[in-house]
Amino acid sequence: MKKSVKILQLFWPAFIPILILNIVALRQIYLANVDHLDPWKGGGFGMFSRINTRFFHVHLLNRGAFECATPSIDYTSHFKKIQHYPKYLSLEHLTKELTKKIWVYENMGRSKKNVTMIGKRKKLSPENTIANFDSVEIQVFDLSFNKQVFTLEPKLIRKINYLK
C-alpha cells in the first residue's frame, strides 16, 4: 500500500496528459452528440463512425418570399466553420454580416437569374439588378441514410434568420 502511494506521489505529473486527453475526448463526444459538432472536427474521435456530408443554403427573404442566394467566395472559411459546428452564435454573426452586404441578380442567360453577393473581388456591373430583401436566412443540413430505401436524405440541423 505504501509503495503504490509513493509511486503516485513520485509520478503524478505523468497523469496530466492522460487527464487532458480524456477531457478533450469527452467534450468532443458530448458536442458531437448534443450540439451538432461534426465528428470529423477536433481530432476526429469517432470520425469513421458514420456517413457525414454537410451543406448549407442561404436565402434572401423579402415579404415572406425567399430566393436562394450564393455567397461570395470571400466567406468560404466562414461557411466551412458553420458546416463543421453550426453554433447559434456563429450563425447569428454570419447572417448579421451578410445582411450588410450587397446582393444582386446576375443574368445567367436564357432568362435565368442568380442571386449572388458582391464580394471584394467582384464589381457591380450595369446589367446587375440589386436584390431587395428584409432578412437573410442560413440553413445547415446533414445527410442521413435511409436504410429502407437506401437513399441519402437531407436533414435540417440548424437555421437562423436575421432581419436587416
Image (cartoon, rainbow, N blue to C red):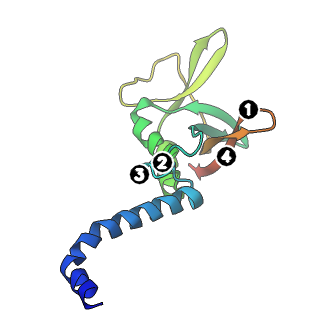
Residue where numbered disc 4 is placed: 156
**Residue 94: image tag:** 2
Residue where numbered disc 3 is placed: 42
Find numbered disc 4 in the image and state the secondary structure of the residue it sits on: strand
Q: Nearer the viewer, mark 3 or mark 2?
A: 3
Q: Residue flagged by tag 1: what amino acid is it?
A: Thr
Select label 4 or label 1 by which is in front. Answer: 1
Mark count: 4
Q: Residue at coordinates 58% horizontally, 58% vertically from top-left?
A: 33
Q: Name the amino acid type tagged 2.
A: Leu
Q: Which mark is residue 105?
A: none
Mark with earlier residue (4, 3): 3
Sequence order check, earlier mark of 3 and 2 = 3
Of the image marks 3 and 1, the number of the one nearer the N terminus:
3
Q: Nearer the viewer, mark 2 or mark 4?
A: 4
* Mark 4 residue type: Leu
Asked if 13 appears above or below 48 in the picture, the reply is below
Res 61 → quadrant: top right
Between marks 3 and 1, how big is the CA–CA gap?
28 Å
Query: Looking at the image, which residue is at 46% across and 64% down?
Result: 27
- Which residue shows up at 40% across the image and 24% down it? 122
For the residues labelled 4 and 3, the Cα–Cα distance comes to 22 Å
C-alpha distance separating marks 2 and 4: 18 Å
Q: Looking at the image, which residue sits at the far bottom?
A: 2
